[in-house]
Structure formats: structure tokens, C-alpha cells
């Protein structure tokens, strides 16, 4: 994701997530908002193909 968006966008998403948490938003709401924004940003640089078939698995990958 960093390759497509750049580190500045990733840092902005992380900042928005932590800010939401500090504003007493629920962790789920904060995560959903950031995922939606990331999806919007990624759709600009990774447009959907004509076949409308996902190229990547629809799975969340957690990195410890």
C-alpha cells in the first residue's frame, strides 16, 4: 500500500486513526473510517479492471 500511496498518505491515515481514538471514537468506528479512506485513495491509483474481479484476496493481514 505504501508503494501506491506513499509514506505521507500512510502517515496521514495513521494519524487520523490515532486522533479518532483520542477523541473517544470506538476502535471499530475509527478503523472503518480509515479503511474507507484508504480504499478511496487506492481506487485512484489502482482502478478496478474491466472484469471487475478482485486481483487480491479479500482478507485482512495483520503484521505484528
Image (tube, rainbow, N blue to C red):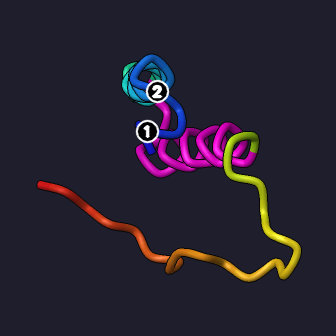
To which residue does mark 1 refer? 3
Residue in view at x 41 percent, y 44 percent:
27
* Residue 56 percent coordinates (x, y): 53, 75
Q: Indicate the quadrant containing the C terminus: top left, top right, bottom left or bottom right.
A: bottom left
Q: Main secondary structure of the magenta part?
A: helix
* Position above or below: 35 against 15: below
Relative image position of residue 26 (x, y in whole percent)? 46, 42
Disc 2 target residue: 6
Which of the pair 3/39 is nearer the observer? 3
Q: How far is the residue under mark 1 from the one under mark 2?
A: 6 Å
Indicate whether residue 41 is drawn in magenta. yes
Q: Which percent across, then down, holds residue 31?
A: 48, 46
* Left or right: 44, with 26 as reference point: right
Asked if residue 39 is among those painted magenta in the image, a careful observer would answer yes
The picture places residue 6, in percent across and down from the top left corner, at 46, 27
Disc 1 is placed on an element classified as helix
Q: Residue at x 49, y 33 (%)?
A: 25
Q: Quadrant of the N terminus?
A: top left
Within the image, what quadrant is residue 47 found in? bottom right
Number of the label disc, if any, that sits on residue 27: none
- The region drawn magenta spans 24-43
The crowding category of the residue bearing disc 2, from other C-alpha atoms within 10 Å (few below 14, some 14 to 19, many at least 20), is few
Quadrant of residue 24 within the rendered picture? top left
| Residue drawn where x is 74% and y is 82% of the image | 53
- Tell me: 7 left or right of 9: left
Amino acid at each position: 500500500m505504501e508503494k501506491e500511496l506513499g509514506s505521507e498518505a500512510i502517515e496521514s491515515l495513521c494519524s487520523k486513526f490515532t486522533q479518532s481514538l483520542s477523541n473517544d471514537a470506538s476502535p471499530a468506528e475509527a478503523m472503518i473510517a480509515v479503511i474507507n479512506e484508504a480504499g478511496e485513495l487506492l481506487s485512484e491509483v489502482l482502478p478496478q479492471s474491466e472484469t471487475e474481479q478482485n486481483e487480491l484476496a479479500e482478507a485482512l493481514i495483520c503484521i505484528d
